[in-house]
Amino acid sequence: MGGRRRALSRYSYLVSLFPRAIARELGLQIELRRRSVSSYSPRPDGSGLLVRSSSPPNRHWADFQAMTEHVARVVFPTLTEPLLSRAELRRRVGHDAAWEALVERPLGEILSRSFEDDLERGIIATDALIGTFAGLDDESLRQNRCFLYHVIGNGTGDWTCRWAGWAR
């Protein structure tokens, strides 16, 4: 590989959702790069499911992604603002079906309604369940909060920033 050598920080996961507004406010001179592939999961038949941020693999995925992207555009900027009331955040989201599916009801319900494929549900469930010790239908909704954190990245729904090293 030619060009300048870059190192991927061991903290890339933690800063992948780092708000650009905070970096600007702190005067940080860092270079962040977009992650184009969200995941790849093989199937037993030798095929696989490649999920790219820019092109959902099918219509069900595209509809679900559109819903989460809408919520991301509204919710992400509030992370650096004074805490809003639940009612005010719901008003700002302005999409009752998305609010119900992602905030009020266990995430497993919308995944069961939206996806027939276990692999697709499993890929999405990973962002909800990792580290929560919850199930998709857990009434505590811990899985929903974890999922929302993973899908609101920088207001686009993508994990658009990956730490690529300090800019020189």
Image (cartoon, rainbow, N blue to C red):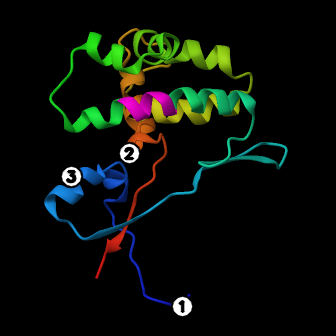
Residue 73's image quarter? top left
Q: Nearer the viewer, residue 84 or 50?
A: 84
The residue range painted magenta reads 69-74
Disc 1/disc 2 C-alpha distance (Å): 30 Å
Element under disc 2: helix
Answer few, some or many: residues within 10 Å of disc 3's Cα (few below 14, many 20 plus, some between 14 and 19). Answer: few
Residue shown at 51% from the left, 35% from the top: 126
Q: Compared to 27, does 107 lie above or below?
A: above
In the image, which disc is placed on residue 154? 2
Q: Position of residue 25 (x, y in %)?
A: 16, 56
- What secondary structure is the stretch in magenta mostly built from? helix
Q: Relative to 54, does residue 143 appear above or below in the rendering?
A: above
Where is residue 8? Give x, y as percent.
39, 70
Type of amino acid at the residue the image marks with label 3 = Ile
Q: Residue 92 at what x, y percent from top left?
A: 35, 20
Kindly identify the amino acid type of the residue bearing the numbered disc 1. Gly
The N terminus, quarter of image: bottom right
Residue under numbered circle 3: 22
**Residue lying furthest bottom:** 2
Q: What residue is at 83 percent from the left and 49 percent from the top?
A: 46
Q: Nearer the viewer, residue 144 or 41?
A: 144
Q: Alpha-carbon neighbours of circle 2 within 10 Å: few (<14), some, or many (≥20)?
A: many
Residue 70 in the magenta stretch? The answer is: yes
